[in-house]
Image (spheres, grey):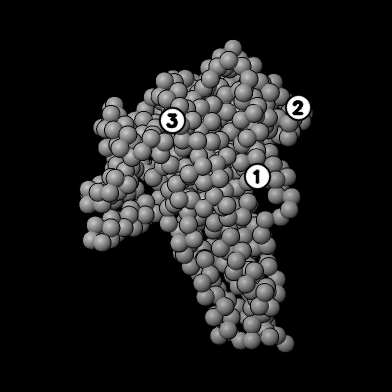
Amino acid sequence: MDEFVYLWRRPQRPTRTPQQMQDWMQRYQAWFNDMEARGHLAQYGQPLEPKGGRVVRDKAGSFSDGPYAETKDVVMGYSVIAAKDLDEAVALTKGHPIFDEGGVIEIRPLLKL
Amino acid sequence: MKPDDALFRREAARLLATLTRAFGIDNLALAEDVVQETLAGAFEAWSYKGVPDHYAALLTTAAKNRALDVFRRQRTARKFAPEVSRFVESEGTLRPGLDACFLPDALKDDQLRMMFTCCHPRLHEDVQVALVLHLLCALGVDEIASAFLVRPAAIEKRLWRGKQKLAESKRLFELTAEDFAPRLAAVHRALYLLFSEGYHGGGSGAVVRIDLCREAMRLVRLLVDHAPAATPATYALGALMWLDAARLPGRVGDDGDLRPLLVQDRSRWDEQLVAEGMMLLGESASGDHLTEYHVEAGIAAQHAAAGSAKETKWDEIVRLYDVLMKIRPSPVVALNRAMAIAESEGPERGLAAVTAIAEVQRLAGYPFYPASVAELELRLGRPLVAKKYFELAKDLARNEGERRFLERRIDECARLSTS
């Protein structure tokens, strides 16, 4: 098994009611539960604050704000998934709720020596 | 449905009641923003590993921190409720003051005060109910609209009008206020309407509607637990909800179709709810003021106590409907009374009572008006006439469950008329 970082990229979420939030949350969790049950979950990973980051540009410390809320596919978090190859890693994203939120998943194999 | 399926809604309602007290009812929108942001954060954070065990404490802390930010940023620009403005002024008293707002004891009071606030006497009952659903049950505009079978724009308007009125006062309704008793009557009415909509209403989606019943019961329980609000009428309202809710599992058959009371499998009724409902009914029997809730609870108790439709004391139920027609007459009550008469004195008399209903035009959109006539015609051995009335009813059906049920009755009439 190899490990892959999944970068969760998606636009800002619309305003939702508490019940809608809970329903969406449960869809996400269901995917993680499935990964765990099938032995694919290496790390849950972490969500990121959607706003308020900075990009530091040089050693003098000059920076720009970002990412911006308008940006379409900001990295909103990451997880680490175990799969036998890149094809399987792609197949495991089937039915993931992020696609219904206009998001994408960037899959990157962890570097092995 | 798992009990924690409504966790976000419960928590949203809890936080909103507390924050509205802290910010003042005139800053309701600000409190709503803080709740929205707090829950949106929890949604992001808990999408990975799920909801942690100590979710309530985490949400409280997160909401409190956001509230602190709001107070720091806005304490000069905005007026806050008198009960909080004294601790808002200085940084040293801000956090302990806010901590006190979030003590568990304060919470029940906050929700009660919010409930009484929503039932403002200058607001139409429809607006009060919409406010209760939005502010105390944390349902969104579309969710309320689908439960009530009205356009979202109409609900939006009701909420807007309601919030305008609420913003005229600074603070939540005081539970010690002089007009507590009349407000309590308005609260009863709003919760009754909320429950009835869930129980009898035409909104699509059975789950949404059972949820309305549950919410109404949760809010009645808050009244029962607060001594000054635990009046005989409150107990009677609770009794009628518990006893009616006990029948919910029998209302839908294994095939997912509607089952009218007369043919329900009574072994499916919830014994626990019946027992609790009977206890509430016992508590309601004091004082000398007979409310419509007492009478309706009495009717529900007659059904709950009967082993079958046949063993039901229909004459007693007719008598109770007579009383109800005096206290709160309506065409729906008259229709139910007529159907009880049919059971007690025969379909002929029942049909006569249906024909005698006053203001019958108010039942024009109600599918169970023609359906009731049809049932009586069928029992009188006129399946062709019955079929016509069932067809009328089907055209008025408000959801798939009603439609399927009425289609079956039409088929039954067709079968009987050819045999």
Identify the residue shown where x is 55% and y is 75%. Answer: A93
Q: Chain of mark 1?
A: B
* B125 left or right of A36 in image: left
Mark 2 or mark 1, whichever is nearer to me: 1
Q: Marks 2 and 3, Cα distance to the nearest angstrom? A: 62 Å
Letter of the chain that mark 2 sits on in the rendering: B
Where disc 1 sits, the SS reads: helix
Q: Are marks 2 and 3 on the same chain?
A: yes
Q: Amino acid at mark 2?
A: Thr
Q: Residues within 10 Å of mark 1 (few under 14, many from 20)?
A: few
Mark 2 vs 3: CB contact within 8 A: no
B128 or B199, which lies in front? B199
Dot 2 falls on a residue whose secondary structure is helix
Q: Amino acid at mark 3?
A: Val
Q: Earlier in the sequence, mark 2 or mark 3?
A: 2
Residue B318: which numbered mark, if any?
3
